[in-house]
Image: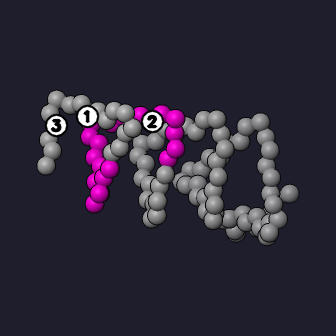
Amino acid sequence: VLERTSDSPEIHLNFRQQTVSLTAGKIELKSARAIGLSSHELSFNANLLSQNLTERQTHISAGDTTHAGSMALYAQRHMGFYSKVTTFAAQSLLKLDGGQIHMG
């Protein structure tokens, strides 16, 4: 049973150091404003991770690594890569294809 006084706008659940497990056929989280997740480590294990967003911003202060069998990036208008040093490497074929290619 969860209870709160009528003058409190928040409900706090404190399980201290206990493990909390939630199992269900389907779980939905909805918020009118925001959902925040904060953890030292956050892991996802799924067959499919799908995102439908208006805008996405990712800020990573250290390294970012992706391992994939195949990868495709599509941009409807513009795609830019900006860094001090950029490396593209391929074992057999590196292909650049465009109406115009400007180098230098």
Residue type, numbered disc 2: Met
Disc 3 element: loop
> In the picture, residue 100 is in which quadrant?
top left
Considering every residue shown, the one lying at the far front of the view is 92
Q: Amino acid at mark 3?
A: Ile
Q: CB of mark 1 within 8 Å of CB of mark 3?
A: yes
Q: Residue furthest right?
A: 1
Q: Main secondary structure of the magenta part?
A: loop
Q: Is residue 46 visible?
A: yes
Q: Is 33 located above or below residue 94 in the figure?
A: below
Residue placed at 55% from the left, 55% from the top?
34
* Residue that label 1 marks: 96
Q: Which mark is residue 71?
A: 2
Q: Earlier in the sequence, mark 1 or mark 2?
A: 2
Q: Which mark, by number, is residue 101?
A: 3
Q: Quadrant of residue 11?
A: bottom right
Q: Is residue 55 left or right of residue 99?
A: right
C-alpha span from label 3 to label 2? 22 Å
Indicate the amino acid at tag 1. Answer: Leu
Q: Position of residue 99 (x, y in %)?
A: 16, 29
Distance between mark 1 and mark 3 Cα atoms: 8 Å
> What number is the disc on residue 67?
none
- Asked which secondary structure carries label 1, the reply is loop
Q: Position of residue 75 (x, y in %)?
A: 33, 36
- Tell me the element at label 2: loop
In the image, what residue occupies the spot 54% across and 54% down?
33
- Indicate the quadrant containing the N terminus: top left, top right, bottom left or bottom right: bottom right
The residue segment tinted magenta is 66-87
